């Protein structure tokens, strides 16, 4: 996949303020300080698309970036820490949960895990939440360039073992480095495959193109605003 354009669209404090649902969205989320904003910049091929801050929990809004004028990257507030009052942290968490559960054009969540750490309870709990709420996701283990050789595979294996009981087959997982660019093409490949599946589902079948006789009432359809837009891809749960 080639990125020809990536622009900031808007920030939303909650689901109701999000932009229209016309474009597929790919959301990135992880524990604060996991390198999320830096990774978004790498994927977009820019240095300052998503603002990077040394302060954990800096992202407090749901930030939307339109890519190639056809899909969106979504930068979600990190979990685990928020700079500010506890009530603000709870508000951010509630907004993120509503977005993940009820955004019809959310096509995939990239759940970011720090590859330099042994399995963290908060990451395991978040993956369990995604599974329980039937949210499509892949795992992305970040910061591989900063970890001694051998530790990354061990930490990934330990994490996958912690979540194995929830799956018939384990979820897709990737490793990446925002410094070296490792993993960029693989993550863009996930997005490209998902967009291809969405486009294939949108194509009318020959049966759909047959004209309906005037005396036959067509079957009812869901309103466009509530129609499910997520691709019905095989999921690991």
Image (cartoon, rainbow, N blue to C red):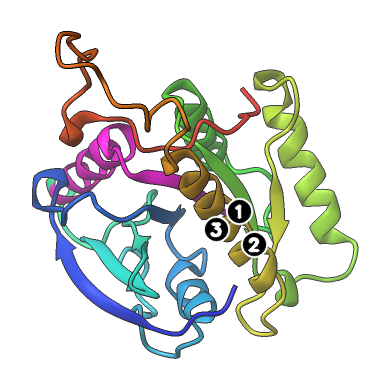
Say which residue label 3 marks: 191
Q: Residue at (9%, 52%) from the top-left corner? A: 17
Q: Magenta stretch: dominant SS? A: helix
Cβ atoms at labels 3 and 1 below 8 Å apart: yes
Q: Is residue 60 visible to the viewer in this orientation of the structure?
A: no
Quarter holding the N terminus is: bottom right
Q: Give neighbour class at mark 3: few <14, some 14-19, many 20+ (Cα, 10 Å).
A: many
Residue 181 position by quadrant: bottom right
Could you tell me residue 173's position as x and y percent?
70, 49
Say which residue label 2 marks: 189
Q: Residue at (62%, 55%) from the top-left corner? A: 140
Label 3 sits on a secondary structure element that is: helix
Cβ atoms at labels 2 and 3 below 8 Å apart: yes
Q: Give neighbour class at mark 2: few <14, some 14-19, many 20+ (Cα, 10 Å).
A: few
Q: CA distance from mark 2 to mark 1?
A: 6 Å
Magenta stretch: give its range.
Answer: 88-112
Q: Residue at (33%, 39%) from the top-left corner? A: 100
Task: Find the residue positioned furthest to the top.
Answer: 216
**Res 29 label:** none
Front position in the image: 24 or 205: 205
Label 1 sits on a secondary structure element that is: helix
Could you tell me residue 33's position as x and y percent?
46, 66
Q: CA distance from mark 3 to mark 1?
A: 6 Å
Q: Give neighbour class at mark 1: few <14, some 14-19, many 20+ (Cα, 10 Å).
A: few
Q: Is residue 142 visible to the viewer in this orientation of the structure?
A: yes
Q: CA distance from mark 2 to mark 3?
A: 5 Å
**Res 193 label:** 1
In the rendered view, does 105 fall on the left or right side of 87?
A: right
Cβ atoms at labels 2 and 1 below 8 Å apart: yes
């Amino acid at each position: 996949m080639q990125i020809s354009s990536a622009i900031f669209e808007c920030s939303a404090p909650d689901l109701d303020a999000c932009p229209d649902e016309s474009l597929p969205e790919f959301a990135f989320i992880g524990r604060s300080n996991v390198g999320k904003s830096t990774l978004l910049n790498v994927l977009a091929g820019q240095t300052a698309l998503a603002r990077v801050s040394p302060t954990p929990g800096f992202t407090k809004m749901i930030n939307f970036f339109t890519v190639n004028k056809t899909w969106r990257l979504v930068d979600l507030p990190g979990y685990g820490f928020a700079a500010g009052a506890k009530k603000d942290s709870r508000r951010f968490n509630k907004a993120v949960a509503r977005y993940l559960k009820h955004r019809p054009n959310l096509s995939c969540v990239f759940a970011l895990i720090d590859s330099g750490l042994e399995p963290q309870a908060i990451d395991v709990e978040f993956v369990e939440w995604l599974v329980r709420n039937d949210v499509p996701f892949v795992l992305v283990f970040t910061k591989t360039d900063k970890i001694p050789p051998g530790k990354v595979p061990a930490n990934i294996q330990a994490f996958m073992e912690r979540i194995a009981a929830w799956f018939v087959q384990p979820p897709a997982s990737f490793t990446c480095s925002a410094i070296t660019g490792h993993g960029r093409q693989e993550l863009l490949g996930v997005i490209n495959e998902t967009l291809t599946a969405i486009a294939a589902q949108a194509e009318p079948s020959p049966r759909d193109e047959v004209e309906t006789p005037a005396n036959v009432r067509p079957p009812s359809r869901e309103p466009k605003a509530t129609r499910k837009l997520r691709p019905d891809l095989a999921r690991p749960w």
